Image (cartoon, rainbow, N blue to C red):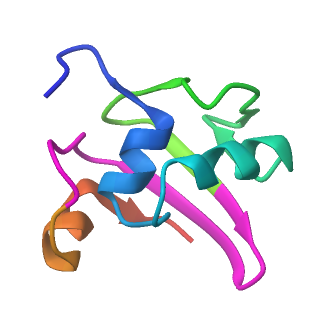
Amino acid sequence: MTEGGLRLDKWLFHARFIKQRVLAVELVRRRRIRLNDRLVEKVHSTVRPGDVITLVAPSGVAVLKVLALGERRGPAPEARTLYEELS
C-alpha cells in the first residue's frame, strides 16, 4: 500500500465503484467526480484517508469518506471497509 496516498482511479477500482480503471478517465472527462469539494481534472489525483469523494452517476449522487486505501480489488465486503457513505 502506498504510504502517502493512492491514485484516484486505483482507489475507485479497489472500492468497486468502477469495473475498469479506464472508466475513471471518462468520469473525470465528464466532470462527474469531486475530491474534497474540488472538481477532479486529472485521474491520477491522490486520495488519502479522510478525503471526501463525490460521484455523480445516473443512479444518483454518492458522497463517500475515504477510510482506507486498500491493496487490491477484493470482494464487496472488503471493498466496503474502504469508505463510509455520507449521502
Magenta run includes residue 1: no
- Residue ID at (61%, 36%): 35
Q: Residue at x 82, y 42 (%)?
A: 29
Rendered-image quadrant of the N terminus:
top left
Q: Residue 60 at x, y = what percent? A: 72, 80
Magenta residue span? 55-73
Residue 19 x/y as whole percent: 46, 66
Q: How far across and down, in percent of the image, does residue 73 sit?
A: 22, 58
Compared with residue 45, is residue 16 higher up or lower down, i.e. above or below? below
Q: Is residue 46 above or below residue 77?
A: above
25 lies left or right of 76: right
Residue sitting farthest toward the bottom: 59
Q: How many marks?
A: 0
Q: Does residue 18 sit above or below 26 in this rendering?
A: below
Q: Is residue 72 magenta?
A: yes
User: Residue 46: x and y, percent?
Assistant: 46, 23
For residue 80, side relative to residue 42 (left or right): left
- The C terminus lies in quadrant: bottom right
Residue 18 lies left or right of residue 75; in this view the side is: right
Outermost residue toward the right in this view: 30
- Please tell me which residue is depicted at 48% across the width and 36% down the height of the picture: 8
